[in-house]
Image: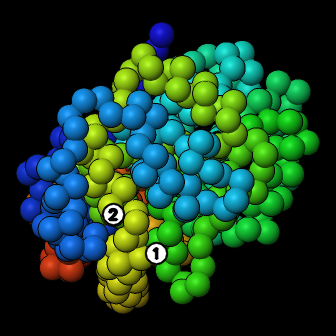
Amino acid sequence: MHIEPFFVEQWMNAHETTATWNIAETCVHSLTLDELLELSGGADEVLRRLKETWLGYGDIVGSPRLRAAIAALYGERIGPDRVLTANGAIGANFLALYALVEPGRTVVSVQPTYQQLFSVPASLGADVRAVRLREEDGYLPDPDTLRAACDDRTSLIVLNNPNNPTGALIDEPLLREVVEVARERDAWLFCDEVYRRLEHEPGTTAPSVADLYEKGVSSGSMSKSYSLAGLRTGWVAGPPEIIQRCLDVRDYTTISAGVLDDALAAAALEHRDKILERSLEIVRGNLAVVDEWIAREPRLHYVRPRAGTIALVHYDHDLPSVDFCQDMFDLKGAFVMPGIAFGEEHSFRLGYASARPVLEGGLAAVSAYLRTLEG
Ligand SMILES: Cc1ncc(COP(=O)(O)O)c(C=O)c1O
């Protein structure tokens, strides 16, 4: 079996520990355990429960408490029995794709997106067809283009909403149109929804495919919106048949997710309003800083993200994105992700949800690098 090296993760691994200004990060500035305990309804109570935790494998499918807290993120269709915990969204995506992909059938995937979502199906023997999301469409999928990419062999359509790397947000009416495309082919619709609940417009929540479609499967995680990547807790939510298939795979890879991670994730989700309030304050405030910065940089432009922690910034210089990003890292210490990781040359992915001083220092370092290109 051949699997493409995962460019984004390899670039992160190679640079993140030595970067002066890490503005490639995709998580909202992570919480400390102390901060989590405070936000989760009081340190004493959470610590008391942790100390009483029995350190066996725990509930194999995830504790009832955590699964109920995850199910509460969805509508009526998704009860706790339609949720399976996993090792981060990366584990959840892998399980879901392993369960959903049929070798020899066609998988239609939007791109740009997180590479795992199309490289894993290809490695499993699917014929992967990319539907490019275009800047002029605000990086939103066109249902007719998706429809044209499907054929009799299409068994799965893959989305990522809100999108990595663009921060584009598919609203409910458009998502319902995409559901219709999947339904016409009786295909599964899988959506990586790790940036859900980080919508910048007050009162807006990204719809979930698991709520809108009987064959919709969603993945989520504690890493991005909830600032808790270190818990390595993610999940798959969807129809019982798929949850069972994921479990069949998971028995071979995971046995169970850690009981301490499970307990902390449950405490966090039970108090998610406070955590999300903090996250939204960070992403909304920081995006305003990015907006002003882009307006001051005549050779940069972007489609303003509507959700999440990241943006795809295009630069007007004739330099491949790997060279641009490596050179900028070496000269000015600013660490961003080359756009080529997403098939988008002359661009870089900016993570703007870090602590404000890191963001401001990082943007200043990018500007200093741009000045060197102008001679
Ligand atoms: C779209 C997307 N899916 C999944 C992941 C993996 O996240 P986790 O930390 O939950 O495994 C990432 C991380 O960058 C991501 O951007």
Give the alpha-carbon distance from disc 2 to disc 1, as whole Å. 36 Å
Q: Mark 2, mark 1: which one is toward the viewer?
A: 2
Q: Position of residue 159 (x, y in %)?
A: 63, 49
Going by the picture, which residue comes out furthest to the top? 1
Q: Position of residue 288 (x, y in %)?
A: 38, 87
Specify which label sits upstream in the sequence, 2 or 1: 2
Q: Where the C terminus falls, by quadrant?
A: bottom left
Q: Position of residue 261 (x, y in %)?
A: 27, 46
Identify the residue at horizontal 41%, vertical 30% (top origin).
Answer: 60
Identify the residue at horizontal 21%, vertical 66% (top origin).
Answer: 45
Identify the residue at horizontal 46%, vertical 14% (top origin).
Answer: 2
For disc 2, the marked residue is 268
Q: Answer left or right for 228 relative to 209.
A: left
- Image label count: 2
For disc 1, the marked residue is 301
Q: Is residue 324 visible?
A: no
Name the quadrant containing residue 49.
bottom left
Find residue 216 and name its label: none
Label 2 is placed on what type of residue?
A: Ala
Label 1 is placed on what type of residue?
A: His
Whether the residue under disc 1 has CB within 8 Å of ligand 1:
no
Q: Position of residue 323 (x, y in %)?
A: 28, 49
Circle 2 SS class:
helix
Going by the picture, which residue comes out furthest to the right? 184
Whether the residue under disc 2 has CB within 8 Å of ligand 1:
no
Circle 1 SS class:
strand
Q: Is residue 214 visible?
A: yes
- Where 190 sits versus 119, above or below? below
Near-viewer residue (72 or 100): 72
Q: Would you say the residues marked 2 and 1 are in contact, meaning their CB atoms lie under 8 Å apart?
A: no
Q: Residues within 10 Å of mark 1 (few under 14, many from 20)?
A: some
- Where 151 sits versus 321, above or below? above
